[in-house]
Image: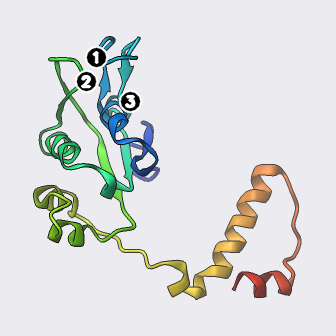
């Protein structure tokens, strides 16, 4: 996102796995006041909030089939309706999805829509777990230490060999 033409726009993250199923629609598409019990005000959804930018749908594998259908529509046409509204809205976002589950297996089990799978599977990055790429552990740790030091104005001059052995 930061290296794209959309970098001056918002990058929104939706942690699908952390949201109850009955709130995901509202998080993604928003709702109007009175749409359901407790909807005491209109709420903007992430697709509106990220307009012109990017949206990351993390743990997309948890979406129920009806939610997958709504997501497929917005990805295919850019169109959606906020909960309780008849007004069709248009989304202009780059969609990025993440899952730690093989979506192809969910498709085979009929728990993930095949048409959504193929819509999402335009460019695929498979990142093996860190336990399978141990050579990355030390450089990542050093990078995190550097980032933390910069963020908190700290000065770390060296890393003990015992620390390196422990994280390996």
Mark 2 or 1, nearer chain start: 1
In the picture, residue 46 is in which quadrant?
top left
Specify whether 66 is left or right of 63: left
Residue 43: image x %, image y %?
38, 20
- Residue 52 location, x and y as percent? 33, 35
**Label 1: few (<14), some or many (≥20) within 10 Å?**
some
Q: Picture quarter containing residue 93? A: top left
Point 14% across, 62% down: residue = 118
The residue at the point 44 percent across, 42 percent down is: 11
- Colour convention of the picture: rainbow
Relative image position of residue 147 (x, y in whole percent) = 71, 59
Apparent side of residue 5 relative to residue 132 in the rendered image (left or right): left
Read off the residue under disc 3. Answer: 49
Label 1 residue SS: loop
Task: Reply above or below: 16 against 159.
Answer: above
| CA distance separating discs 3 and 1 | 19 Å
Total label count? 3
> Residue under circle 1?
35
- Which badge, 3 or 1, is on the more N-terminal residue? 1
- Which element type, helix, strand or loop, lies under badge 3? helix
């Amino acid at each position: 996102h930061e290296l794209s033409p959309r970098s001056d726009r918002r990058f929104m993250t939706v942690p699908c796995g952390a949201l109850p199923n009955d709130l995901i629609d509202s998080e993604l598409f928003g709702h109007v006041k009175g749409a359901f019990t407790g909807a005491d005000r209109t709420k903007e959804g992430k697709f509106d909030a990220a307009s012109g930018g990017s949206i990351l749908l993390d743990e997309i594998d948890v979406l129920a089939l009806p939610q997958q259908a709504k997501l497929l529509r917005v990805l295919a046409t850019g169109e959606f309706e906020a909960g309780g509204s008849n007004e069709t809205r248009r989304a202009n976002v780059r969609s990025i999805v993440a899952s730690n589950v093989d979506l192809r297996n969910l498709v085979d089990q009929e728990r993930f829509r095949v048409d959504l799978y193929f819509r999402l599977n335009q460019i695929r990055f498979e990142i093996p777990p860190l336990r399978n790429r141990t050579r990355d552990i030390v450089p990542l740790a050093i990078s995190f230490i550097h980032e933390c030091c910069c963020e908190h104005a700290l000065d770390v001059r060296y890393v003990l060999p015992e620390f390196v052995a422990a994280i390996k």
